[in-house]
Image (spheres, rainbow, N blue to C red):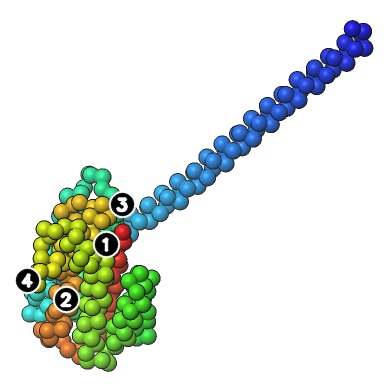
Amino acid sequence: MTPAQFRAAMNKQQRQQKQAIDNHNREVRRHNAAVKKTVKLYNRDMRTYNAKARAHNARVENQRRRLNQEIQRLNSRPAATTFVTYRSSVETLAQAYAATEASVSGRTISSAGRELVDRGSEEAANSAYLLNAMHGDGAPEDDPTENQLRGPSMQTELLRFGPDLVDRWTGALFSLSPRNPDAARHFCTSAREVLIAMIDGAAPDSRVAEADPSCSRTDRGVPTRRAKVGYLLRRKGIDEKSIEDLVEQDMDNVLSLFREFNDGTHGHAGKFTITQLNALRIRVESAIGFIYALCQA
């Protein structure tokens, strides 16, 4: 090999070596950039998750404080002679929520179960607030206008069960007017139909009986509401008696409210203020949201 050939060979080898080093460095940079991007995306997702978790926990804690405040206000007044049955149901629901929280405290439960428990605090708080409002201890500073009081809501949740329920709920809201002496009665009649239709639609008698032939039944031989609640909970993978009790007490609470109005035992016909009607609407809206969460497979 001549000196010129040797130099050419060495130059070629150096070029190849440099090219290999450059390729390696390029791959390292590409890998590092990909890792950095992945870490950045992970950190962003974690920040988003943590922010949502903090916001959720803050909302739940706020509902717990609100429940305690409403119960304290309720207990600070002498026992009234109206809404006696509903008051008992309000207290039972609050106790059921407290018992459920105590039962699941320190244990890991499913996200679906946690959602129902968390919603339970809102249900109990809204039921207590409604009772306080009916006794003249509401929050008129939060009153909507009459048009807002009768405006649409819960359409996304109800549409899952069909447009008929959206129409029924819209009709119920339309009846809410302080000038309508039968506003609460008409509202409760339609609202009761909506809630029962949600449960029956998500848990038809035939499916409940097929899933558990030995389920509890009514005198007519069809599955009871509690059997349907149990069916819906098991479908969500929830097997917690305390949560089942909470759901059942919540249903009892809102249905006992409807009975009080529809039986005419409340003694306030034609005298409901916007504050009271708004409290009634809030209570039923939260019940729709609660049942919607229960019925989601």
Q: CA distance from mark 4 to mark 1?
A: 25 Å
Along the line of sight, the residue nearer the viewer: 96 or 167 = 167
Residue type at mark 2: give it.
Leu
Q: CA separation, marks 1 and 2?
A: 20 Å
Q: Which residue is mark 3?
A: 111
Q: Which residue is mark 4?
A: 219
Q: For the residues marked 3 and 4, what is the alpha-carbon distance in whole angstroms?
A: 36 Å
Mark 1: few/some/many CA within 10 Å (<14, 14-19, 20+): many
- Work out whether residue 168 or residue 231 is closer to the camera in this orientation and state it: 231
Q: Is residue 296 above or below residue 78?
A: above
CA gap, disc 3 to disc 2?
A: 29 Å
Q: How many marks?
A: 4
Mark earlier in primary sequence (3, 2): 3
Question: Which residue is label 2 attached to?
Answer: 257
Labelled disc at residue 294: 1
Task: From the top left corner, tell me how far across and down residue 160 is, in percent.
Answer: 35, 69
Disc 1 on helix, strand or loop?
Answer: helix
The amino acid beneath tag 3 is Ser
The nearer-to-camera label among 3 and 4 is 4
